[in-house]
Image (tube, grey):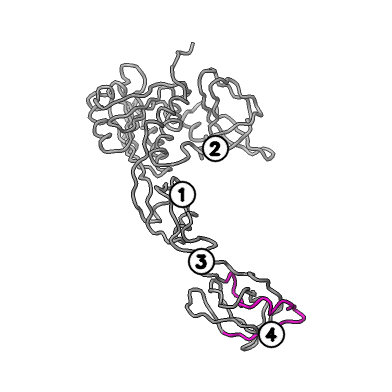
Amino acid sequence: MVKKVAMGLTEALQLMFNAINTLKTEKLPLLECVDRVTACDLLAKVSSPSVDASLKDGFGVISSDIAYATAEKPVRLHRAGLMAAGGTEEIPVTSGTAVQLLTGAGIPPGADAVVAEEFVTIKGDEILVHIHAEPGRNILKKGIDVSYGRTVAQQGEKLTPGIIGILAASGHSNIEVIRNPLVSIVATGDEIVAPGRPLPKGKLYASNISTLSAWCHRYKFQPRPILVKDDPDALFKTFTEQIAENDVMITSGGAWTSDRDLVAKTLARLGGWHQLFHRIRIGPGKAVGFGLLDSKPVFILPGGPPSNLIGFLQIALPGLLKLAGHKLQQLPVMPVRLGTTLDGRHKDWTQFIFGTLENQQGKVEFHPLENASRLRSMAEAEAIVTIAEGQTILPAQTETIVQLLT
């Protein structure tokens, strides 16, 4: 028999999102803003290119002068000079003349087309043009990449390397972005040891906080992991210090209801603690909790590795993404076909299943991992399938959506 748990995933997420406010902003040099989130709309300060420019090495001409040029009957023009990219000199083109242009050079006054150099023979101060060129040929119009005053990046947009390049072209060197959260990750338990230290018999290394810290680094959050013994006073002191020094706190372990599970009990002793939920109908990860301590978010995660990771990915990560201003507050997703039937076990719960992806005849198939090693399954997993409340079976060949882990 499954013990009744009052709250489902959807309600828990809504409570959590309603309680979290996006962090304040900071101004950073442009190249430090990759994958950060814009705090406001960013408008182009200049047009790029700033003038009509040549797309090729060639010759600026009047198109009507060479309308009937062919390889057999080339048109002879006088070469009036040369213009290079960034140059300030303007050499006008008149009927019967042409100006030699290097790629990126401004279009000379009077010219309305550029003939690529491979279609031209140079003979001293004269050229022979072997092909026609209609108006606009090989001309990059002013502002075609960036137009002055136009929006380059919208508020809440994640700044990819491509957008960073456009922002540079539009005259930006420093950008106002949402501050990334300082994330305290507090692992509790007498049995855990920090990686790198000697491992006494019966102990184990604290792998959970390494996994959670790695996920934080992926999103450019700033994790601050710390280990604490199962001692009420030590936990009380640590929670008080960590919430004062960071934007959010994640606890790992001690989340259930036994005498040794002290996280919720210790939080309840703190005057500024307001719990919104603790235990929801998800598997694995049912012991996950959330609340506010001194108005800052606190996520309570169970200690078992699969439950710990699912609690983080489905509850804590969306909250961290909202703190950092991201519009997409979940893992990326993609459509797949199930390679085998999946069992959700209980229709009132949301079930998450780790698996791998395989290309089969043009379709991406999901295959669940059944490795006896929890850590190995999590490490090999490429995606997660969700079996939502109200469902117990997803038959093989079902089309569904997976959350991507890689």
Q: Which residue is mark 3?
A: 49
Give the CA separation, mark 1 to mark 3. Answer: 21 Å
Q: Secondary structure at mark 3?
A: loop
Which residue is the site of mark 1? 154
Residue 308 vs residue 330, the one in the foreground: 330
Gap between marks 3 and 2 measured at Cα: 37 Å
Expressed as whole percent of the image width and height from the top left, the position of residue 66 reads 70, 78
> In the rendered image, which residue does mark 2 sit on?
333
Which residue occupies the foreground of this view, 246 or 395? 246
Give the Cα separation between the discs numbered 4 and 3: 31 Å
Going from N to C along the chain, the mark reached first, 4 or 2, is: 4
Give the CA separation, mark 4 to mark 1.
51 Å
In the depicted structure, whether residue 19 falls above or below residue 169:
above
Q: Which residue is mark 4?
A: 76
Q: Are marks 1 and 3 in contact (CB under 8 Å)?
A: no
- Alpha carbons under labels 2 and 1: distance apart: 23 Å
The kind of secondary structure element at disc 4 is strand
The spot of residue 289 in percent (x, y) is 38, 25
**Disc 4/disc 2 C-alpha distance (Å):** 60 Å
Label whose residue precedes the other's in the sequence (3 or 2)? 3
Res. 92 mark: none
First to last magenta residue range: 54-80
Q: Amino acid at mark 4?
A: Arg
Badges 3 and 2: C-beta atoms under 8 Å apart? no
Query: Left or right: 203 with respect to 271?
Result: right
Provide residue 284's location: percent of width, then percent of height: 47, 24
Q: Earlier in the sequence, mark 4 or mark 3?
A: 3
Residue 276 x/y as whole percent: 36, 24
Q: Residue furthest bottom?
A: 124
User: Which residue is depicted at the point 38% across and 27% down?
Assistant: 301
